[in-house]
Image (spheres, rainbow, N blue to C red):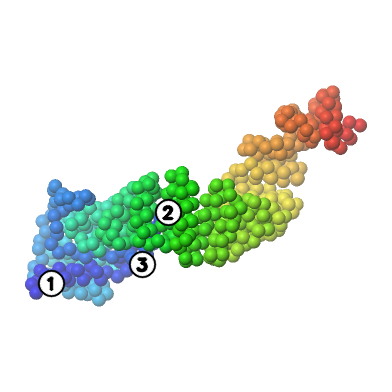
């Protein structure tokens, strides 16, 4: 065997022998999609450093055509002497054996002996990566790129380091450069590794148009890869090209009729196209093909959602219930069943469903908050407060945090714990203002005879949602605050909208009497008494 041929083989072994600590990207990133997640590179197929190519092919651009001007090294490359080639082989063997201290020393000696050859820099970079010295590895890879600008291994490995450091924009750019440089040079396996890395960063960036192009290249490398076909269809759908994704989804289902994820994606596409009936037919067809219980549960849960969206809440409940029977550990199905039962007024049924959901997913704050809300409707304030407190320990954010605080406040109010109610409801309002929280805050303040605070909170509730109840309570707080003219204005609006509102007529009479307009007051009080308000009768005596 000639010396150059042996060098190519040892270089190949060096590249393939890099341990996981020097190759692996951060955990696979997922992006919310129409089906909750967009599948990305599987953790079991972690990226490996691609093989060092033998004789470089002409540089090509990202389309695969020859580049007009091949990359030129920043300095003239000095070939390795025969002795230096032997030293390189020895260093590579030390690296493969995990003798990193020895390998680093040998590669550094080669760098010192022939600084303008890229191979010692590359070997040293991989060794430093194995020793978790990313800073040193970055420097050596920078030298390698300067000496071998047409090689994809440099930007690829720099991308790995950037991803580890959380510099995702840099990683995306570097993987893109590697993907351009590898065309016509790398093996299919190496190309797949680079494309997987690029796809991961495009997924993180939610650039689904670019991701579609990358996954199309992946499928072209391996047309039998069903997961890549599925991810390509997902990416096209998320990029707004759902109709264009349909041929690929149908082709995948032809190969694997029982793939529930592909069937669900098909449903999503038709729903997005405004064709829910077609989506339902495809869903029902999938249920005849799919036999695995967990998959059937997912399909039935999606069917429940479609039925609920169409207004058929009865059959939606039945479908969600069937989903829980197919997979007794599907917490999402139990939670949806609870939501649907609550919407139909079946509070005991909703309670049972949410209890199952929280048992299966005890760390899910949303399920716990929903359970607390159902307990409130069943007049179980103590248990509702306990569930809300448990949800808050999970540190929810946004709407879920506000909802848990709201439930805490209502529970405290129902138990007569008004100061605690005020504290919780104020926190809820600060997190996410709502008309209901402001209403109960006003009622809680009123119960403590803090009428000014009550009026302010009730005015906010009316501003957010001017319901008759909120306006009537606001009028009451204004009366208690001696703001009679303001109360009268609110009450006149109420009686003009509903002339049979006896309580509003009664309070209007009080507001008018407080302003020393006895004639007007008696008319209002007589109207209230005629409508059956006993307090108005007493006020007329």
Numbered label attached to residue 265: 2
Q: Nearer the viewer, mark 3 or mark 2?
A: 2
**382 sits left or right of 157 in the view:** right
**For mark 3, what is the residue?**
44
Q: Pinpoint residue 314: horizontal percent, then vertical percent.
A: 61, 53
Q: Residues within 10 Å of mark 3 (few under 14, many from 20)?
A: few
Question: Residue 31's image quarter?
Answer: bottom left
Q: Pinpoint residue 537: horizontal percent, then vertical percent.
A: 88, 34
Q: Nearer the viewer, mark 1 or mark 2?
A: 2
Numbered label attached to residue 6: 1
Q: Earlier in the sequence, mark 1 or mark 2?
A: 1
Q: Is residue 437 above or below residue 166?
A: above
**401 sits left or right of 245 in the view:** right
> In which quadrant will I find the C terminus?
top right
Q: Secondary structure at mark 2?
A: helix
Give 286 or 336, whichever is nearer the viewer. Answer: 286
Q: Secondary structure at mark 3?
A: helix
Q: Secondary structure at mark 1?
A: helix
Identified at 14% across, 57% down, the residue is: 57
Q: Earlier in the sequence, mark 3 or mark 2?
A: 3
**250 sits left or right of 393 in the view:** left
Q: Nearer the viewer, mark 3 or mark 1?
A: 3
Q: Is residue 188 above or below residue 210?
A: below
Identified at 33% across, 65% down, the residue is: 46
Give 529 or 538, whichever is nearer the viewer. Answer: 529
Q: Residues within 10 Å of mark 1 (few under 14, many from 20)?
A: some
> In which quadrant will I find the N terminus?
bottom left
């Amino acid at each position: 065997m000639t010396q150059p041929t042996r060098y190519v083989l040892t270089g190949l072994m060096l590249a393939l022998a890099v341990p996981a600590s020097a190759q692996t990207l951060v955990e696979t990133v997922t992006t919310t999609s129409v089906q909750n997640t967009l599948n990305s590179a599987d953790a079991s197929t972690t990226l490996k450093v691609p093989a060092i190519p033998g004789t470089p092919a002409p540089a090509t651009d990202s389309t695969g055509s020859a580049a007009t001007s091949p990359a030129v090294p920043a300095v003239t490359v000095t070939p390795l002497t025969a002795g230096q080639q032997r030293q390189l082989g020895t260093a590579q063997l030390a690296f493969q054996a995990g003798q990193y201290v020895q390998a680093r020393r040998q590669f550094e000696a080669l760098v010192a002996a022939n600084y303008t050859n890229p191979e010692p820099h590359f070997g040293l970079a991989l060794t430093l990566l194995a020793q978790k010295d990313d800073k040193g590895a970055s420097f050596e890879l920078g030298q390698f790129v300067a000496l071998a600008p047409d090689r994809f291994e440099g930007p690829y490995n720099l991308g790995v380091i950037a991803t580890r450091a959380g510099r995702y924009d840099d990683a995306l750019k570097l993987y893109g450069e590697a993907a351009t440089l590898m065309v016509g040079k790398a093996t299919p396996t190496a190309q797949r590794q680079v494309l997987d890395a690029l796809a991961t960063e495009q997924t993180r960036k939610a650039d689904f148009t670019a991701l579609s192009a990358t996954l199309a290249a992946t499928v072209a490398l391996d047309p039998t890869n069903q997961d890549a076909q599925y991810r390509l269809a997902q990416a096209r759908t998320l990029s707004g090209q759902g109709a264009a994704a349909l041929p690929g989804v149908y082709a995948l289902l032809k190969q694997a009729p029982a793939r529930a994820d592909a069937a669900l994606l098909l449903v999503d596409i038709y729903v997005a196209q405004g064709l829910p009936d077609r989506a339902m037919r495809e869903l029902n067809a999938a249920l005849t093909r799919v036999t695995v219980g967990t998959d059937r549960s997912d399909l039935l849960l999606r069917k429940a959602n479609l039925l609920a969206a169409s207004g058929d809440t009865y059959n939606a409940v039945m479908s969600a219930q069937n989903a829980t029977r197919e997979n007794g550990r599907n917490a999402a199905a139990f939670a949806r069943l609870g939501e649907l039962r609550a919407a139909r007024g079946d509070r005991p049924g909703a309670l049972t469903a949410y209890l199952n959901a929280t048992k299966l997913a005890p760390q899910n704050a949303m399920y716990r908050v929903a359970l607390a809300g159902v307990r409130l409707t069943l007049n179980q304030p103590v248990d509702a407060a306990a569930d809300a407190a448990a949800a808050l320990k999970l540190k929810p954010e946004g709407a879920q945090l506000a909802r848990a605080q709201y439930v805490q406040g209502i529970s405290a109010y129902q138990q007569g714990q008004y100061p605690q109610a005020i504290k919780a409801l104020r926190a809820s309002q600060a997190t996410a203002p709502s008309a209901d929280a402001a209403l109960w805050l006003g009622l809680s303040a009123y119960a403590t005879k803090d009428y000014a605070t009550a009026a302010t909170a009730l005015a906010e509730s009316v501003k957010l949602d001017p319901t008759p109840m909120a306006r009537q309570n606001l009028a009451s707080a204004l009366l208690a605050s001696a703001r009679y003219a303001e109360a009268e204005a609110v009450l006149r609006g109420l009686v003009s909208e509903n002339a049979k509102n006896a309580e509003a007529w009664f309070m209007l009479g009080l507001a008018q009497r407080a302003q020393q307009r006895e004639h007007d007051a008696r008319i209002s009080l007589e109207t209230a008494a005629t409508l059956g308000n006993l307090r108005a009768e007493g006020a007329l005596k």
